[in-house]
Amino acid sequence: MHDMISLVHKIVRKCKDATRGLYIALVIDLSFRLAALVGLLLLAFGYSMWPLSELELAGLIVGWTLILITELQNTAIETALDRLHPEQHESIGRSKDIAAASSLVSFIFIIFVVIWIYVS
């Protein structure tokens, strides 16, 4: 029983940490706030195109989720690299560019989803 209570406490602590991370991202990162705003735009688009098929709705949800995830990861990577190696360095710059590319790919994905829904 003690192990189960300890596990529950650990899960609750991890959820608090993750929630704090979301809050921090919303407060300090303009890119993440813009990614969150994209969700409102996608909601408006989905409403204007209603009714959506299950696949179209899933595409919008998955696309927006990918944008949020990649923005969070990009911010985390850039923040850590800036702290560990604050001066300019070629390989650090490449790493940050590659992390930023993941965000770009997620935005391109959602653009394809929106075009696919609009055309069909």
Image (tube, rainbow, N blue to C red):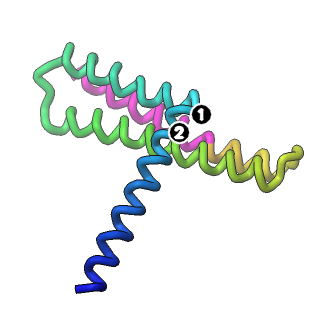
Q: Main secondary structure of the magenta part?
A: helix
The answer to whether mark 2 and mark 1 are in CB contact below 8 A is yes
Residue 67 placement (x, y as % from top left): 44, 38
Residue 13 placement (x, y as % from top left): 40, 62
Kindly identify which numbered label has been placed on residue 112.
Answer: none
Q: Would residue 93 appear left or right of 29 to someone viewing this image?
A: right
Q: Would residue 84 appear left or right of 62 to someone viewing this image?
A: right
**Residue nearest the viewer, comparing 72 with 6:** 6
Task: Classify 10 Å Cα crowding around label 1: few (below 14), some (14-19), many (20 and above).
Answer: few
For the point 27% across and 18% down, the residue is: 45
Q: Amino acid at mark 1?
A: Ile
Q: Amino acid at mark 2?
A: Ala
**Region rendered in magenta:** 100-120
Residue 84 placement (x, y as % from top left): 78, 56
Q: From the image, which quarter does the C terminus lie in?
A: top left
Is residue 114 placed above or below 10 in the rendered structure?
above
* Residue linked to disc 1: 28
Q: Would residue 8 appear left or right of 108 to someone viewing this image?
A: left
Secondary structure found at label 1: helix
Kindly identify which numbered label has been placed on residue 25.
Answer: 2
**Residue nearest the viewer, comparing 74 with 11:** 11
Residue 107 placement (x, y as % from top left): 47, 32
Is 106 in the magenta? yes
Task: Classify 10 Å Cα crowding around label 2: few (below 14), some (14-19), many (20 and above).
Answer: some
Is residue 50 placed above or below 55 in the rendered structure?
above
Distance from disc 2 to disc 1, alpha carbons, whole Å, reads: 5 Å
For the point 38% across and 57% down, the residue is: 15
Is residue 103 placed above or below 45 in the rendered structure?
below
For the point 34% across and 78% down, the residue is: 6
**Residue nearest the viewer, comparing 64 with 29:** 29
Is 49 in the magenta? no
Secondary structure found at label 2: helix
